[in-house]
Amino acid sequence: MVKKRERLEIIRDILQAISDAKNIKPTRLLYSSNLSPQMFKEYVGELSTKGLIRESKVKNNKVFILTKKGTDFLKSYKELEGTIRNFGL
Amino acid sequence: MQKLIYSYNPSHKMGIDLILQNTELMTILYAFFIAFICAILVLKIDRMFKISDYQGLRYIRNAFFFYSLSFIILFVLGRGEVNASLIYTKVIWFLFKFLITTAVLFLLYSLIWKKVEKNKSHNSLFNLKSATIYLIALVLSITGTHIFYPSQIILNIAILSFSLKNLINEKNKYPFLKYYSIAICASLLHWTTSYLIELGLLNAHTAILSIFGNLAFFLIFLGGILNITRNKNG
């Protein structure tokens, strides 16, 4: 059975998808994130509220882009994951 | 521990006369050193928590925050204890017991929060779970030696059992899990030695074991976090 992704891994995957594409349309991000539409909405809402991502417009299309905080999260992800796993948190 | 430090008689056996002749200074340095280690841990973990909003980081940060406060209270505010009034001494000792128990409970909670929490709280210092932790700490801090010391030993054994469980589950995948358990063993050594000295079953000179146990506990955690943040790969 495939191991269920943890919350932090899902966040990393969403941010990584945005980072790779520079800007990404919601539908494409939904496919990349591999989440149900409901879960996707919740995660994207949370990430926007926390300032990790923000909405923008490119050629009149809604896209998501990474903020500085989001970029910092990706950079620190290994450090974060290392601390969480090594400290058994 | 309070009695250990202050009743520790710097007599002939050790070849560290300079240290022993300056017990008060060394005590303050010891407290500041531990508080400094805790401050580094709190700041590093807090930075990670602010980025990730991960609850486990929040609880371990709180643990080291309370450890830091407890040592400052006991060894800095309580340093004039010999000449201080009995009430002042009792208040300091009560605060120390309360803060250190809170720290140990937060450390334990950082290992089990996933099993306990359903909803995320926005403030980790003032909510129902924290109130429960404070209440348990309050009850334990008003107890005497024969409940307080064994309670610390039991709490540390609980932490050790969860850390060993993590170590077995992860099968040596994360190197610090092993050191985490060693750190808790050092803490156990500290509390057990302190209790046995309180009971008069160990010579007061063995207080040095207790101090080393305590220092080892904090230094192992500091080494762990510095290593992880330096390598960035855990």
Image (tube, rainbow, N blue to C red):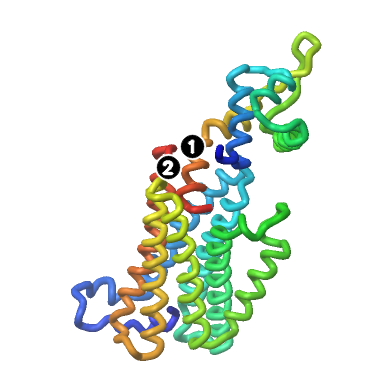
Q: Amino acid at mark 1?
A: Lys
**Residue B81 visible in image:** yes
The residue to which callout 1 is attached is A78
Q: Residue at x 38, y 67 (%)?
A: B185
Which chain is indicated by disc 1?
A
Residue hosting label 2: B234
Q: Helix, strand, or loop for circle 1?
A: helix
Mark 2 → mark 1, Cα distance in angstroms: 7 Å
What is the quadrant of the N terminus of chain A in the image?
top right
Name the residue furthest front.
A1
- Amino acid under disc 2: Gly
Q: Toward which corner of the image does residue A3 lie, by quadrant?
A: top right
- Which residue: 48% across, 40% down? A79
Report x, y in % for residue A42. 75, 37
> In percent of the image, x 74 and y 22: which residue is there?
A26
Judging depth in this view, the residue of B114 and B37 nearest the camera is B114
Name the subunit of mark 2.
B
Location of residue B64 with respect to B15 vertically, above or below: above
x and y, in percent, of residue B68 in the image: 51, 63
